[in-house]
Image (cartoon, coloured by chain):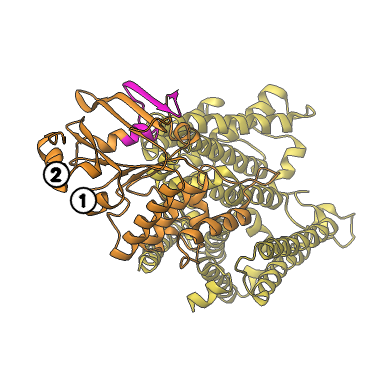
Chain colours: A orange, B yellow
Amino acid sequence: MSATQALVEVHELSKHFGGIHAVEKASCDLHAGEVVGLLGHNGAGKSTLIKVLSGVFPSDGGSIRVHGRDCHFRTPRDAREAGIETIHQTLALAENLDAPSNLFLGRELLTPWRTLDADRMEHEARQVIQRLNPNFTNLRKPVRSMSGGQRQTVAIARALYFNARILIMDEPCAALGPAETRMVLDTIQRLKQEGIGIFLISHDMADVFEVCDRVTVMKNGSVVDTVRIADVTPDEVLAMIILGQKPRAKG
Amino acid sequence: MRSWLERAGFDPRFTSLVLALAAIWIALAVVTDGIFLSPRNLYNLSIQTCVTALMACGMVFIIVARQIDLSVGSLMAFTGMVIAWMQVTWLGSDTTGAAWLSIGGGLLAGALVGVFQGWWAAYREVPAFVVTLAGYLMWRGAAFLVADGQTLAPLALPYQRLGGGVNGSIGTAWSWALGAFACALVIAAVLRARRSRARYGADMAPAWADALKVGASCAAILGFVAVVSAYPDPSAAAEGATPPGKGIGIPVLILIAAAALLHGVATSTRFGRYVFAYGGNPEAALLSGLPTRRVLLLLFALMGALAALASVITTARLNSGTHSIGQMAELYVIAATVIGGTSLAGGAGTIPGAIVGALLIQSLDNGMVLMDVSSPKRQISIGLILIAAVWFDVVYNRKQGK
C-alpha cells in the first residue's frame, strides 16, 4: 500500500433495507492514479455500495473519508461536491435532451441574468466530448437517437468536465460493441495517468485484468478480500467471486 | 421533406400544426360564407381562446413532467368565487383597489390549492391523476360553499375590462404600437441568437430560413392587429360618430405576457430544464441530484395560479362569480396541450404549440357554433379530435424512434 493519502477510504460501511443487509461492514480504499475493480455476483452488494458512495442512499453505519475528511452524503449533489462523479450503469441520461443539456444537468452554466447559457454550455460540451471521441460531432440531437458509444461518451464527459478526482464507473462496457469498449478502456488508462482514481464495476475478467490495479471482491454484502491484480490469476479471482475463497498468500 | 425542414431550423411538428390550423380556418371560412374570418368573429375567437390557452401553458409543464391536472376547471370555479366574494361581499365592488386585491387573493388561493395537490403528488407519491381527480370534486364543492351556491354580482368596473368586453381592449393606436414593438422583439431575438451562435462557431440555420420565420411571425402579428382594429367599438365612440376599432383585447395581452414569461421559463431557466429532464427520465433526474419533489410541487402551484388567472378573465367577462364556470375546461385544456404537440409520455412539449393547439380547438368550436351545430354534437367532435391528436402523437413517436 502506498504511503500517500488515499482519495477514498471506506471503513466498515453498512446499508440495510429492512432486514436485508445489502452491504455489511464493507471496507475498501482508492488511491490517486489507481483503478480498483469492484467484483461480485449480482446481489453481492457492489451496486448498493457505489450508490452509497455516490449519495443515492444514505449509509446506515461506518464511515467514508474523502481526501482524509469524513463525509456524509445525503444527496447525489453532496457526493459530487466532494469530488466523486458516478457513471451509472443506466448512464442516467435524460433521453429527450441533447448532449450539452445532459452534460450540465443539475450544474447548468448561467448568464448574469440567471438564465441558462445554452451557447456556452454547447461550446464547453463540444470541447470535452471531442477530446474523448473526435468522431462525435452532432451534439444537438436528443440522446435518444445516439449510439451506445455516444451515450457513454456523454456520461463520461459529464463526469470529467467538473474535474472529478474520483470516478465510479458501473459496468461502463456492458452495452457496448468491441470498438466502443476499446474507446472506454483507453479512456480509463488515460484518466489513470492523469492521477484520477477509479472504482470500476465489471463482469468482464479480460477488462478487469487489463485496466485494474487491485480488485475488491464482494459476496453477500461483505468484502471477501482486496488483492493486487499482479498477485492473482483470473481463476483465483473467480474463486473469490463464486466461493468467497481467499487466494493462498504468496510467499 | 422532414429532414429538409429540420435542417432549416423548423420544428416539423409545430409547422404541421400551423398548416393544419390554416387549413381549418380556410375550410370554416368557406362553409360559413366568410363569417368565420370577419373581424367581429376573430376578435371574439381571440378572447375565447385566452382562457383555454392560459391554462394550456401550465398544462404543458405538468404533462411534460409526466403528471396530469384534472382539477383546473373546478379550480377556476373556486378561485373565481374567492375573487367575487372578496369584491362583492367583503370589500365592496366600489372600493378602490378591491379589484386588484381580489385578483391577488384569487391567485394566492389558486397557488395554495396547487401546493396542496403538489404536496400529495410529490411528497406523498399519490398519483397526480388521483389527487387532481379528487380535486376536481373538492374544489367544485368548495366553490359552492364560498357563497352557498349564490351568484355574486356585479363586479368592480375596472375589473370588468379584463374580460375583453365593453372597454376591454386597448384601441387601435396602442395596438399598432404594440404590434410594431413585438415585431422588433422578434427580429432582435433572432439576430441575437445568430450572433451568439456565430461567436461559438455553432451550427446555424440558413439565413433565408430565419428570414422566413421572422417574416411569417411579423405577418401574423400585424395581421392580427389589423383584424382587431377593423372591428368597430361602439362603446368608445361619441354619439353618431364613426366608432373607432377595438384593437387588441386585454385578455389577449394577459395571455401574451403569461405565455412569453412561461416560454422563457421552459427554455431558459433551470426550473424549466429540470421539468423536461424529469419528464424525459425521472431516475436520471434523481441521480443527477435535481430537487425533483420541489420542482413537482412548484409545477402544481404554477398550474393553480394560472387557473386563477383564467378565472379572472372568465368572471370579468361574465361580470359575476358563479360556481358553475369552467365545466369541462380540463378536457379542453388537456386537448389543446396534446394537440399542440405535448407528448403524454412526458419530456416533450412547447408553449407556442399549446397556444396554437388552444386556438385550433377553439376555432373548431367557434366554427361549429356559426354552422349551428348543436352542443352535444360539438362535444362529440372535440372528443374525436382529441383521440386523433393523441393517435398522431403515437404515430409520430414511433417514427421518431426508428
- Report the front residue among B241 and A32: A32
* Residue receiving disc 1: A205
Residue B59 vertical placement versus B44 (above, below) = above
Which residue is most to the top?
A61
Where residue B51 appears, as percent x and y from the top left, is 59, 49
Q: Which quarter of the figure has residue B188?
A: bottom right
Q: Give x and y (percent) for residue A197.
A: 40, 41
Label 2 SS: helix
Position of residue A98 measured from the top left corner of the image (x, y, whole percent): 49, 57
Residue type of the residue flagged with mark 1: Met
In front here: B110 or B368? Answer: B110
On screen, B33 above or below A240?
below
What numbered label is drawn on residue A245?
none
User: Is B111 on the left-hand or right-hand side of A76?
Assistant: right
Q: Identify which residue is drawn at 62% across, 71% down.
A: B205
- Which image quarter holds the C terminus of chain B? bottom left
Disc 1 element: helix
Residue neighbourhood size for the residue with mark 1, other residues' Cα within 10 Å, grouped as few (<14), some (14–19), many (≥20): few
- For image coordinates 56% across by 65% down, the residue present is B367
Span of residues in magenta: A50-71
| Neighbours of disc 2 within 10 Å: few (<14), some (14-19), many (20+) | some
Q: Position of residue A125 (x, y in %)?
A: 54, 55
A196 relative to B205 in the view: left or right: left
Q: Residue at x 58, y 69 (%)?
A: B9
Q: Which residue is mark 2?
A: A238
Determine whether, in the image, residue A51 is placed left or right of residue A243. right
Asked whether disc 2 touches disc 1, contact meaning CB atoms under 8 Å apart, the reply is yes
As drawn, which residue projects farthest toward the left?
A243
Q: Is residue B7 magenta?
A: no
